[in-house]
Image (cartoon, grey):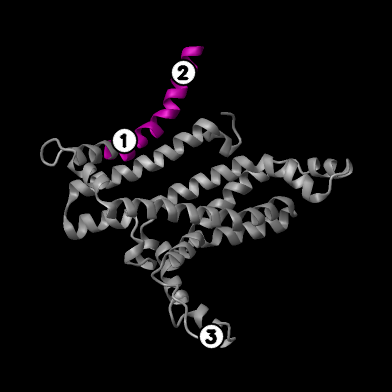
Amino acid sequence: MKGENTSKDLALIAPLAAFFLVFFLIPFFYIFYRSLWDPSFTLKHYIHIIQEPLYLRVIFNTIKLAFVATVVCLILGYPFAFLLATTSEKTSNRLLAIVLIPFWISLLVRTYSWIIILGRKGLINSILLKIGIIDEPLTLLYTMKGVIIGMTHILLPYMIISLFSVMRGIDLDLLKAARNLGANSFNAFIRIFFPLSLPGVTGGSLMVFVMGLGFFVTPALLGGPKDVVISVLIENQVTFILNWGFAFAVAIVLCVIALVMVYFYNRYMGILKVVGGES
């Protein structure tokens, strides 16, 4: 009986394992191999990354951009997810539909729309000039601020959905019980609801941060020459400089940064807590 259950488990896992092997592990080890053999064994690409301040600044820009976008998404997404979790089911479904609508629009189209909105003659500058808040157009496009705005717009739904998936499992009667025992609404939220929602906070932050590390389209279109990120650097090395070995090495560095974040999250929080399971 135990052998039959094991065979069934393996049969269920096999398709996922095969997909993971073909589309992740094999390409990853191929890129890792190509970064070390160019054409013979060498560490020159990794040494070049460490020794060149420009590339270290690119790595720092990438981490900084992903971190800031994660913080902004958390600040904006937490109240909205809280509203989704505490309002009526009918209202919650309508608000959740609004969150999901951006997924139906191409990422490229959404990014190009921000070029129109953030330009010197765009919507934001036109409104601010018209009402007299500013005397000359603000420089929002091709800056780090513009990239953060564009990335937040695209990544915010992922944060909201991650938070909501945890918040909807919190028993709201606990808040009522706390208020009946003398706690005000703020104390009940801080001492009961917020700690219970932390798996959603950390899980959503991890997802948004890792996705932000690998963002390409938005930084490439909205960022300036001083705001180059790792994905744009890889594209330049492959397309224009044709230095494939160095591009592979930079890609491995990006993967390692993401895997380190996932490792520490899993070590201290547990991946399964994101979906309400046990570590």
| Quadrant including the C terminus | top right
Residue holding disc 3: 129
Q: Amino acid at mark 2?
A: Thr
Q: Is residue 25 magenta?
A: yes
Q: Amino acid at mark 3?
A: Leu
Residue holding disc 2: 6
Residue 272: which quarter of the image?
Answer: top right
Do labels 3 and 2 touch, CB within 8 Å?
A: no
Question: Residue 184, how many percent across, how many down?
Answer: 83, 49
- Please tell me the numbered disc located at residue 78: none
Question: Residue 47, how many percent across, how many down?
Answer: 22, 42
Mark nearest the camera among 2 and 1 is 1
Magenta-drawn stretch, dominant element (helix, strand or loop): helix
Lower position in the chain sequence, tag 1 or tag 3: 1
Q: CA distance from mark 3 to mark 2?
A: 68 Å
Residue at screen point 61% across, 36% down: 276
Q: Secondary structure at mark 3?
A: helix
Question: Residue 238, how many percent across, how many down?
Answer: 21, 55
Q: Is residue 99 left or right of residue 178?
A: left
- Furthest toward the left, the residue is 39
- Label 3 environment density (alpha carbons within 10 Å; few <14, some 14–19, many ≥20): some
Task: Tell which of 187 and 81 is nearer to you.
Answer: 187
- Label 1 environment density (alpha carbons within 10 Å; few <14, some 14–19, many ≥20): few
Residue holding disc 1: 25
Q: CA distance from mark 2 to mark 1?
A: 24 Å
- Label 2 environment density (alpha carbons within 10 Å; few <14, some 14–19, many ≥20): few
Boundaries of the magenta span: 1-27
Q: Is residue 151 left or right of residue 81?
A: left
Q: Amino acid at mark 1?
A: Leu
Residue at screen point 54% across, 62% down: 101
Q: Is residue 144 left or right of residue 38?
A: right
Lower position in the chain sequence, tag 2 or tag 1: 2
